[in-house]
Image: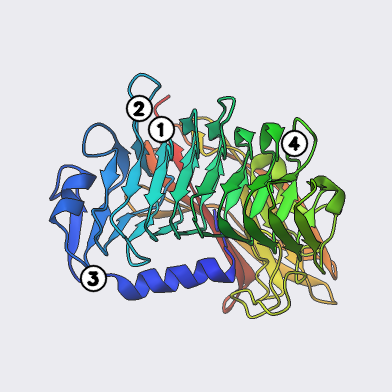
Protein backbone atom coordinates (compact mmCIF):
# COMPACT_ATOMS: atom_id res chain seq x y z
CA UNK A 1 0.00 0.00 0.00
CA UNK A 2 1.22 3.50 -0.74
CA UNK A 3 2.59 4.83 2.57
CA UNK A 4 3.63 8.44 3.05
CA UNK A 5 5.73 9.80 5.90
CA UNK A 6 6.41 13.24 7.27
CA UNK A 7 8.96 15.61 5.81
CA UNK A 8 11.64 14.39 8.18
CA UNK A 9 11.05 10.81 7.05
CA UNK A 10 11.23 11.87 3.41
CA UNK A 11 14.50 13.64 4.12
CA UNK A 12 15.89 10.33 5.36
CA UNK A 13 14.93 8.76 2.03
CA UNK A 14 16.89 11.44 0.21
CA UNK A 15 19.91 10.79 2.38
CA UNK A 16 19.71 7.09 1.63
CA UNK A 17 19.38 7.61 -2.09
CA UNK A 18 22.31 9.98 -2.13
CA UNK A 19 24.53 7.75 -0.02
CA UNK A 20 24.14 4.40 -1.76
CA UNK A 21 27.55 3.15 -2.90
CA UNK A 22 28.32 1.55 -6.23
CA UNK A 23 29.54 -1.48 -4.26
CA UNK A 24 26.57 -3.71 -3.45
CA UNK A 25 26.98 -6.96 -1.53
CA UNK A 26 24.12 -9.41 -2.08
CA UNK A 27 22.66 -11.65 0.63
CA UNK A 28 22.25 -14.58 0.24
CA UNK A 29 23.47 -14.57 -3.38
CA UNK A 30 27.09 -13.72 -2.52
CA UNK A 31 27.11 -13.98 1.27
CA UNK A 32 25.19 -16.61 3.18
CA UNK A 33 24.09 -14.43 6.09
CA UNK A 34 23.46 -10.76 6.78
CA UNK A 35 26.38 -10.71 9.23
CA UNK A 36 28.73 -12.10 6.58
CA UNK A 37 27.71 -9.31 4.26
CA UNK A 38 28.34 -6.69 6.95
CA UNK A 39 31.68 -8.22 7.93
CA UNK A 40 32.86 -7.98 4.32
CA UNK A 41 31.51 -4.49 3.66
CA UNK A 42 33.55 -1.31 4.01
CA UNK A 43 32.34 2.23 4.61
CA UNK A 44 30.05 3.40 1.81
CA UNK A 45 28.95 -0.10 0.78
CA UNK A 46 25.40 -1.40 0.65
CA UNK A 47 24.41 -4.85 1.90
CA UNK A 48 21.31 -5.73 -0.12
CA UNK A 49 19.18 -8.53 1.30
CA UNK A 50 16.86 -10.54 -0.93
CA UNK A 51 13.27 -11.45 -0.06
CA UNK A 52 12.88 -14.18 2.53
CA UNK A 53 12.88 -15.04 6.23
CA UNK A 54 16.32 -15.04 7.84
CA UNK A 55 16.98 -17.10 10.96
CA UNK A 56 19.82 -18.55 12.99
CA UNK A 57 23.35 -17.44 13.70
CA UNK A 58 24.49 -14.67 11.40
CA UNK A 59 20.91 -13.52 10.88
CA UNK A 60 20.24 -12.37 14.45
CA UNK A 61 22.34 -10.49 17.01
CA UNK A 62 23.66 -8.71 13.92
CA UNK A 63 26.45 -6.21 14.68
CA UNK A 64 27.15 -3.22 12.41
CA UNK A 65 30.67 -3.06 13.95
CA UNK A 66 30.84 0.71 13.56
CA UNK A 67 30.64 0.66 9.77
CA UNK A 68 29.10 3.50 7.76
CA UNK A 69 27.11 1.21 5.49
CA UNK A 70 23.53 0.73 4.36
CA UNK A 71 21.90 -2.61 5.18
CA UNK A 72 18.59 -2.81 3.38
CA UNK A 73 16.10 -5.25 1.94
CA UNK A 74 15.39 -5.39 -1.77
CA UNK A 75 11.62 -5.09 -1.51
CA UNK A 76 10.63 -3.90 1.94
CA UNK A 77 9.57 -5.31 5.30
CA UNK A 78 6.52 -7.15 3.92
CA UNK A 79 8.88 -9.52 2.10
CA UNK A 80 12.04 -9.59 4.23
CA UNK A 81 12.02 -10.82 7.84
CA UNK A 82 14.69 -11.23 10.49
CA UNK A 83 13.21 -13.82 12.85
CA UNK A 84 15.30 -13.79 16.03
CA UNK A 85 13.66 -16.96 17.40
CA UNK A 86 14.38 -15.72 20.90
CA UNK A 87 12.79 -16.67 24.20
CA UNK A 88 13.52 -16.37 27.89
CA UNK A 89 15.79 -19.43 27.83
CA UNK A 90 17.60 -18.52 24.62
CA UNK A 91 17.55 -14.70 24.28
CA UNK A 92 18.40 -13.00 20.99
CA UNK A 93 17.81 -9.63 19.35
CA UNK A 94 17.77 -8.42 15.78
CA UNK A 95 20.54 -5.82 15.45
CA UNK A 96 23.18 -4.16 17.63
CA UNK A 97 24.72 -0.70 17.18
CA UNK A 98 27.44 -0.20 19.78
CA UNK A 99 30.64 0.95 18.10
CA UNK A 100 29.98 4.61 17.58
CA UNK A 101 27.86 4.28 14.46
CA UNK A 102 26.68 7.58 12.94
CA UNK A 103 23.71 8.51 10.77
CA UNK A 104 25.62 7.02 7.81
CA UNK A 105 24.97 3.57 9.33
CA UNK A 106 21.52 2.80 7.95
CA UNK A 107 19.11 -0.08 8.54
CA UNK A 108 16.12 -0.07 6.20
CA UNK A 109 13.26 -2.27 5.12
CA UNK A 110 13.09 -5.31 7.43
CA UNK A 111 10.48 -6.93 9.60
CA UNK A 112 12.20 -7.74 12.90
CA UNK A 113 10.32 -10.21 15.06
CA UNK A 114 10.60 -12.59 18.00
CA UNK A 115 13.49 -10.80 19.65
CA UNK A 116 13.72 -11.52 23.36
CA UNK A 117 16.20 -9.23 25.05
CA UNK A 118 16.51 -5.66 26.26
CA UNK A 119 16.19 -4.02 22.89
CA UNK A 120 14.56 -7.10 21.43
CA UNK A 121 14.53 -5.63 17.95
CA UNK A 122 17.53 -3.29 18.16
CA UNK A 123 19.94 -2.13 20.85
CA UNK A 124 21.59 1.26 20.25
CA UNK A 125 24.41 1.94 22.71
CA UNK A 126 26.58 5.06 22.36
CA UNK A 127 25.70 5.25 18.67
CA UNK A 128 23.57 7.31 16.30
CA UNK A 129 22.40 5.15 13.38
CA UNK A 130 19.49 5.75 11.03
CA UNK A 131 16.68 3.21 11.48
CA UNK A 132 14.19 3.75 8.68
CA UNK A 133 11.18 1.96 7.21
CA UNK A 134 11.24 -1.22 9.29
CA UNK A 135 8.48 -3.15 11.05
CA UNK A 136 8.98 -4.29 14.67
CA UNK A 137 6.45 -6.92 15.66
CA UNK A 138 6.16 -9.26 18.66
CA UNK A 139 9.55 -8.49 20.20
CA UNK A 140 9.69 -8.76 23.98
CA UNK A 141 11.79 -8.05 27.03
CA UNK A 142 11.45 -8.36 30.78
CA UNK A 143 13.35 -5.12 31.22
CA UNK A 144 13.67 -2.21 28.73
CA UNK A 145 12.68 -1.63 25.13
CA UNK A 146 10.74 -4.45 23.50
CA UNK A 147 11.27 -2.95 20.04
CA UNK A 148 14.26 -0.61 20.43
CA UNK A 149 16.46 0.29 23.41
CA UNK A 150 18.52 3.49 23.18
CA UNK A 151 21.21 3.93 25.84
CA UNK A 152 23.33 7.08 25.60
CA UNK A 153 22.48 6.99 21.91
CA UNK A 154 21.06 9.45 19.38
CA UNK A 155 19.55 7.46 16.52
CA UNK A 156 17.03 8.71 13.99
CA UNK A 157 14.05 6.33 14.22
CA UNK A 158 11.86 7.25 11.26
CA UNK A 159 9.05 5.79 9.21
CA UNK A 160 8.86 2.48 11.10
CA UNK A 161 5.92 0.45 12.41
CA UNK A 162 5.96 -0.86 15.99
CA UNK A 163 3.16 -3.27 16.86
CA UNK A 164 2.67 -5.97 19.46
CA UNK A 165 6.02 -5.44 21.21
CA UNK A 166 6.18 -5.72 24.98
CA UNK A 167 8.13 -5.03 28.17
CA UNK A 168 5.84 -6.56 30.72
CA UNK A 169 7.88 -7.47 33.79
CA UNK A 170 6.94 -5.55 36.94
CA UNK A 171 9.44 -2.80 36.08
CA UNK A 172 9.31 -3.18 32.31
CA UNK A 173 9.68 0.07 30.35
CA UNK A 174 8.88 0.90 26.76
CA UNK A 175 7.01 -1.78 24.85
CA UNK A 176 7.89 -0.04 21.60
CA UNK A 177 10.92 2.13 22.44
CA UNK A 178 12.86 2.89 25.63
CA UNK A 179 15.43 5.72 25.87
CA UNK A 180 17.78 6.11 28.84
CA UNK A 181 21.22 7.13 30.12
CA UNK A 182 21.47 10.41 28.24
CA UNK A 183 19.87 9.18 25.03
CA UNK A 184 18.65 11.86 22.61
CA UNK A 185 16.89 10.15 19.70
CA UNK A 186 14.62 11.69 17.08
CA UNK A 187 11.46 9.56 16.80
CA UNK A 188 9.83 10.69 13.57
CA UNK A 189 6.92 9.57 11.41
CA UNK A 190 6.35 6.14 12.97
CA UNK A 191 3.20 4.11 13.59
CA UNK A 192 3.36 2.92 17.22
CA UNK A 193 0.41 0.58 17.71
CA UNK A 194 -0.80 -1.86 20.38
CA UNK A 195 2.46 -2.23 22.28
CA UNK A 196 2.44 -3.08 26.00
CA UNK A 197 4.63 -2.46 29.04
CA UNK A 198 4.44 -1.94 32.76
CA UNK A 199 5.37 1.71 32.12
CA UNK A 200 5.11 3.40 28.74
CA UNK A 201 3.33 1.07 26.37
CA UNK A 202 4.57 2.94 23.31
CA UNK A 203 7.59 4.97 24.44
CA UNK A 204 9.34 5.35 27.79
CA UNK A 205 12.28 7.48 28.86
CA UNK A 206 14.63 7.74 31.83
CA UNK A 207 17.23 10.53 31.90
CA UNK A 208 16.88 11.26 28.20
CA UNK A 209 16.07 14.11 25.83
CA UNK A 210 13.65 12.96 23.16
CA UNK A 211 11.98 14.61 20.16
CA UNK A 212 8.74 12.87 19.16
CA UNK A 213 7.61 14.31 15.81
CA UNK A 214 4.80 13.31 13.49
CA UNK A 215 3.98 9.89 14.95
CA UNK A 216 0.66 8.03 15.12
CA UNK A 217 0.30 6.28 18.49
CA UNK A 218 -2.81 4.14 18.97
CA UNK A 219 -3.96 1.39 21.31
CA UNK A 220 -0.80 1.12 23.40
CA UNK A 221 -1.27 -0.02 26.98
CA UNK A 222 0.65 0.16 30.26
CA UNK A 223 -0.08 -1.81 33.38
CA UNK A 224 0.77 1.13 35.62
CA UNK A 225 1.56 4.48 33.95
CA UNK A 226 1.76 6.02 30.49
CA UNK A 227 -0.37 4.16 27.98
CA UNK A 228 1.38 5.90 25.09
CA UNK A 229 4.36 7.60 26.78
CA UNK A 230 6.08 7.42 30.17
CA UNK A 231 8.52 10.31 30.68
CA UNK A 232 10.76 9.94 33.73
CA UNK A 233 13.55 12.36 34.61
CA UNK A 234 13.66 13.53 31.00
CA UNK A 235 12.87 16.32 28.61
CA UNK A 236 10.56 15.56 25.72
CA UNK A 237 8.79 17.42 22.94
CA UNK A 238 5.71 15.96 21.25
CA UNK A 239 4.83 17.76 18.01
CA UNK A 240 2.51 16.96 15.08
CA UNK A 241 1.48 13.65 16.66
CA UNK A 242 -1.78 11.70 16.99
CA UNK A 243 -2.24 9.88 20.32
CA UNK A 244 -5.58 8.16 20.82
CA UNK A 245 -6.95 5.04 22.46
CA UNK A 246 -3.88 4.43 24.62
CA UNK A 247 -4.59 3.30 28.17
CA UNK A 248 -2.86 2.69 31.49
CA UNK A 249 -3.61 1.50 34.99
CA UNK A 250 -4.00 5.06 36.25
CA UNK A 251 -5.76 6.10 33.07
CA UNK A 252 -3.44 8.49 31.26
CA UNK A 253 -2.13 8.60 27.69
CA UNK A 254 1.09 10.28 28.92
CA UNK A 255 2.56 10.09 32.43
CA UNK A 256 5.44 12.12 33.84
CA UNK A 257 7.75 11.46 36.78
CA UNK A 258 10.89 12.65 38.59
CA UNK A 259 11.19 16.23 37.45
CA UNK A 260 10.45 15.71 33.77
CA UNK A 261 9.69 18.56 31.41
CA UNK A 262 7.26 17.95 28.54
CA UNK A 263 6.16 20.16 25.65
CA UNK A 264 3.07 19.11 23.66
CA UNK A 265 2.03 21.20 20.65
CA UNK A 266 0.16 20.85 17.37
CA UNK A 267 -0.98 17.34 18.29
CA UNK A 268 -4.28 15.43 18.46
CA UNK A 269 -4.41 13.99 21.97
CA UNK A 270 -7.50 12.15 23.15
CA UNK A 271 -8.58 13.79 26.39
CA UNK A 272 -6.46 16.88 25.76
CA UNK A 273 -4.18 18.11 28.55
CA UNK A 274 -6.29 16.08 30.98
CA UNK A 275 -4.82 12.91 29.48
CA UNK A 276 -1.38 13.83 30.85
CA UNK A 277 -0.41 12.98 34.44
CA UNK A 278 1.78 15.77 35.83
CA UNK A 279 2.93 15.03 39.41
CA UNK A 280 4.60 17.63 41.64
CA UNK A 281 8.04 18.65 40.42
CA UNK A 282 7.25 18.01 36.74
CA UNK A 283 6.55 20.72 34.19
CA UNK A 284 4.05 20.46 31.34
CA UNK A 285 3.98 23.11 28.66
CA UNK A 286 0.66 22.66 26.85
CA UNK A 287 1.54 24.53 23.70
CA UNK A 288 -0.57 25.99 20.93
CA UNK A 289 -2.28 24.04 18.18
CA UNK A 290 -3.41 21.00 20.16
CA UNK A 291 -6.79 19.40 19.44
CA UNK A 292 -8.92 16.53 20.68
CA UNK A 293 -10.84 15.35 17.62
CA UNK A 294 -11.43 12.21 15.56
CA UNK A 295 -8.45 12.12 13.18
CA UNK A 296 -10.60 10.54 10.44
CA UNK A 297 -8.38 7.73 9.22
CA UNK A 298 -9.08 6.08 5.88
CA UNK A 299 -9.98 2.69 7.41
CA UNK A 300 -8.65 2.31 10.93
CA UNK A 301 -10.25 -1.10 11.47
CA UNK A 302 -8.02 -2.47 8.70
CA UNK A 303 -4.92 -0.66 9.90
CA UNK A 304 -5.02 2.08 7.27
CA UNK A 305 -4.11 5.21 9.23
CA UNK A 306 -3.79 7.60 6.31
CA UNK A 307 -5.92 10.73 6.56
CA UNK A 308 -9.16 11.67 4.80
CA UNK A 309 -9.18 15.21 3.39
CA UNK A 310 -11.79 16.33 5.93
CA UNK A 311 -9.53 15.29 8.80
CA UNK A 312 -8.87 17.98 11.42
CA UNK A 313 -5.25 16.77 11.36
CA UNK A 314 -4.65 17.99 7.78
CA UNK A 315 -2.70 21.28 7.54
CA UNK A 316 -2.85 21.79 11.31
CA UNK A 317 0.65 20.70 12.30
CA UNK A 318 3.39 23.13 13.20
CA UNK A 319 3.19 26.04 10.73
CA UNK A 320 6.97 26.21 10.39
CA UNK A 321 7.17 22.62 9.12
CA UNK A 322 6.09 21.46 5.67
CA UNK A 323 5.01 18.18 4.17
CA UNK A 324 6.72 16.89 1.00
CA UNK A 325 3.94 18.51 -1.09
CA UNK A 326 5.08 21.89 0.33
CA UNK A 327 1.86 22.43 2.30
CA UNK A 328 1.70 23.01 6.04
CA UNK A 329 2.49 19.81 7.91
CA UNK A 330 -0.25 17.41 8.93
CA UNK A 331 -0.48 15.60 12.25
CA UNK A 332 0.43 11.93 12.43
CA UNK A 333 2.69 9.57 10.54
CA UNK A 334 1.05 10.03 7.11
CA UNK A 335 0.43 13.27 5.31
CA UNK A 336 -2.40 13.97 2.89
CA UNK A 337 -0.82 14.56 -0.51
CA UNK A 338 -2.28 17.71 -2.04
CA UNK A 339 -0.40 17.63 -5.32
CA UNK A 340 -3.64 16.77 -7.12
CA UNK A 341 -7.27 17.44 -6.34
CA UNK A 342 -8.50 13.87 -6.79
CA UNK A 343 -7.05 11.20 -4.50
CA UNK A 344 -7.28 7.40 -4.50
CA UNK A 345 -6.59 5.08 -1.57
CA UNK A 346 -6.65 1.28 -1.75
CA UNK A 347 -7.15 -0.70 1.45
CA UNK A 348 -6.96 -4.50 1.06
CA UNK A 349 -9.24 -6.53 3.30
CA UNK A 350 -6.96 -9.53 2.80
CA UNK A 351 -3.49 -9.87 1.27
CA UNK A 352 -3.39 -13.66 1.06
CA UNK A 353 -5.81 -15.61 -1.10
CA UNK A 354 -5.95 -19.02 -2.76
CA UNK A 355 -6.92 -19.67 -6.39
CA UNK A 356 -10.72 -19.70 -6.52
CA UNK A 357 -10.89 -17.43 -3.48
CA UNK A 358 -12.05 -13.82 -3.14
CA UNK A 359 -9.92 -10.71 -2.85
CA UNK A 360 -11.66 -7.71 -1.26
CA UNK A 361 -10.41 -4.15 -1.65
CA UNK A 362 -11.92 -0.94 -0.30
CA UNK A 363 -11.54 1.99 -2.69
CA UNK A 364 -11.56 5.48 -1.19
CA UNK A 365 -11.85 8.37 -3.64
CA UNK A 366 -11.66 12.04 -2.64
CA UNK A 367 -12.59 15.11 -4.72
CA UNK A 368 -11.29 18.43 -3.40
CA UNK A 369 -12.52 20.45 -6.39
CA UNK A 370 -15.51 22.79 -6.02
CA UNK A 371 -17.24 21.08 -8.94
CA UNK A 372 -18.18 17.47 -9.79
CA UNK A 373 -15.42 15.30 -11.24
CA UNK A 374 -16.00 12.45 -13.65
CA UNK A 375 -13.14 9.99 -13.90
CA UNK A 376 -12.33 6.47 -15.04
CA UNK A 377 -10.83 3.78 -12.81
CA UNK A 378 -8.64 0.96 -14.12
CA UNK A 379 -7.37 -1.86 -11.90
CA UNK A 380 -4.64 -4.32 -12.83
CA UNK A 381 -2.77 -7.28 -11.39
CA UNK A 382 0.96 -7.55 -12.01
CA UNK A 383 1.71 -11.27 -12.02
CA UNK A 384 4.81 -13.00 -10.61
CA UNK A 385 6.13 -13.24 -14.19
CA UNK A 386 5.74 -9.40 -14.46
CA UNK A 387 2.91 -9.67 -17.01
CA UNK A 388 -0.03 -7.34 -16.39
CA UNK A 389 -3.70 -8.31 -16.44
CA UNK A 390 -6.69 -5.97 -16.19
CA UNK A 391 -8.99 -7.03 -13.36
CA UNK A 392 -11.52 -4.18 -13.47
CA UNK A 393 -12.44 -1.31 -15.78
CA UNK A 394 -11.91 1.14 -17.15
CA UNK A 395 -15.17 2.14 -15.42
CA UNK A 396 -16.70 5.61 -15.19
CA UNK A 397 -17.49 7.30 -11.87
CA UNK A 398 -18.52 10.77 -10.67
CA UNK A 399 -17.68 12.46 -7.36
CA UNK A 400 -19.61 15.47 -6.10
CA UNK A 401 -17.78 18.67 -5.13
CA UNK A 402 -15.75 18.51 -1.91
CA UNK A 403 -16.85 14.91 -1.42
CA UNK A 404 -15.34 11.53 -0.75
CA UNK A 405 -16.69 8.02 -0.87
CA UNK A 406 -15.75 4.41 -0.20
CA UNK A 407 -16.70 1.26 -2.07
CA UNK A 408 -15.84 -2.37 -1.37
CA UNK A 409 -14.77 -4.19 -4.53
CA UNK A 410 -14.51 -7.99 -4.72
CA UNK A 411 -12.49 -10.02 -7.21
CA UNK A 412 -12.68 -13.75 -7.76
CA UNK A 413 -9.17 -15.14 -8.14
CA UNK A 414 -9.04 -17.56 -11.12
CA UNK A 415 -8.49 -21.22 -10.34
CA UNK A 416 -5.56 -21.18 -12.75
CA UNK A 417 -3.81 -18.30 -10.94
CA UNK A 418 -0.16 -19.11 -10.37
CA UNK A 419 0.88 -19.03 -6.69
CA UNK A 420 3.30 -16.25 -5.84
CA UNK A 421 3.62 -12.55 -5.16
CA UNK A 422 1.29 -10.21 -7.06
CA UNK A 423 0.95 -6.44 -7.18
CA UNK A 424 -2.51 -4.88 -7.30
CA UNK A 425 -2.58 -1.46 -8.93
CA UNK A 426 -5.41 1.00 -9.54
CA UNK A 427 -5.34 4.27 -11.44
CA UNK A 428 -7.93 7.02 -11.74
CA UNK A 429 -8.00 9.77 -14.34
CA UNK A 430 -9.40 10.86 -17.68
CA UNK A 431 -8.05 8.92 -20.69
CA UNK A 432 -5.85 9.24 -22.55
CA UNK A 433 -3.59 11.79 -20.89
CA UNK A 434 -4.85 12.78 -17.42
CA UNK A 435 -3.79 10.70 -14.42
CA UNK A 436 -5.18 11.90 -11.10
CA UNK A 437 -3.74 9.32 -8.75
CA UNK A 438 -2.42 5.77 -8.43
CA UNK A 439 -2.19 3.39 -5.49
CA UNK A 440 -0.81 -0.13 -5.11
CA UNK A 441 -0.40 -2.98 -2.66
CA UNK A 442 1.10 -6.47 -2.77
CA UNK A 443 -0.64 -9.77 -2.12
CA UNK A 444 0.17 -13.44 -2.10
CA UNK A 445 -1.70 -16.08 -4.05
CA UNK A 446 -1.07 -19.24 -2.05
CA UNK A 447 -1.54 -22.95 -2.64
CA UNK A 448 -5.11 -24.01 -1.85
Tell me if mark 4 has few (under 14), some (14-19) or many (20+) residues whose alpha carbon lies within 10 angstroms of its own: many
Circle 3 residue: 21
Q: Secondary structure at mark 1?
A: loop
Badge nearest the viewer, 4 or 3: 4
Q: Residue at x 78, y 41 (%)?
A: 252
Q: Report the Cα–Cα distance between label 4 and label 2.
A: 29 Å
Q: Report the Cα–Cα distance between label 4 and label 3.
A: 45 Å
Q: Report the Cα–Cα distance between label 1 and label 4.
A: 24 Å
Circle 4 residue: 247
> Which x, y percent locates residue 91?
35, 27
In the rendered image, the vertical position of residue 87 relative to residue 193, given as above or below: above
Q: Report the Cα–Cα distance between label 3 and label 2.
A: 34 Å
Badge nearest the viewer, 1 or 4: 1
Tell me if mark 2 has few (under 14), some (14-19) or many (20+) residues whose alpha carbon lies within 10 angstroms of its own: some
**Label whose residue precedes the other's in the sequence (1 or 4):** 1
**Label whose residue precedes the other's in the sequence (4 or 3):** 3
Circle 1 residue: 117
Circle 2 residue: 91
Closest to the observer, 300 or 207: 207
Q: Are marks 4 and 3 in contact (CB under 8 Å)?
A: no
Q: Secondary structure at mark 2?
A: loop
Q: Secondary structure at mark 3?
A: loop
Q: Are marks 3 and 2 in contact (CB under 8 Å)?
A: no
112 left or right of 66 in image = right
Amino acid sequence: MKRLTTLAGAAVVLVLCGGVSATVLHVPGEYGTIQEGIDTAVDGDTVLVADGTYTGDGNRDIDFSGKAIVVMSENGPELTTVDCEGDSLDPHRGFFFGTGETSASVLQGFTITNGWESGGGILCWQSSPTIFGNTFIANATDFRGGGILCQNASPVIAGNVFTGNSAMASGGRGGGIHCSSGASPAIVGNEILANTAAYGGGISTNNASVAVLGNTMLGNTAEFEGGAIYCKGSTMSVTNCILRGDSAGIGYEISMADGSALVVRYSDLEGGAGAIYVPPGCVLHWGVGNIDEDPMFVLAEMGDYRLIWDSPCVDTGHPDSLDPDSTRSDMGAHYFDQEDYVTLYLTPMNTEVAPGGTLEVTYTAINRWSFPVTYWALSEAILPNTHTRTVMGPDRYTLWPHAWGQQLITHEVPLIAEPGLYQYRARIGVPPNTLYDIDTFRLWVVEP
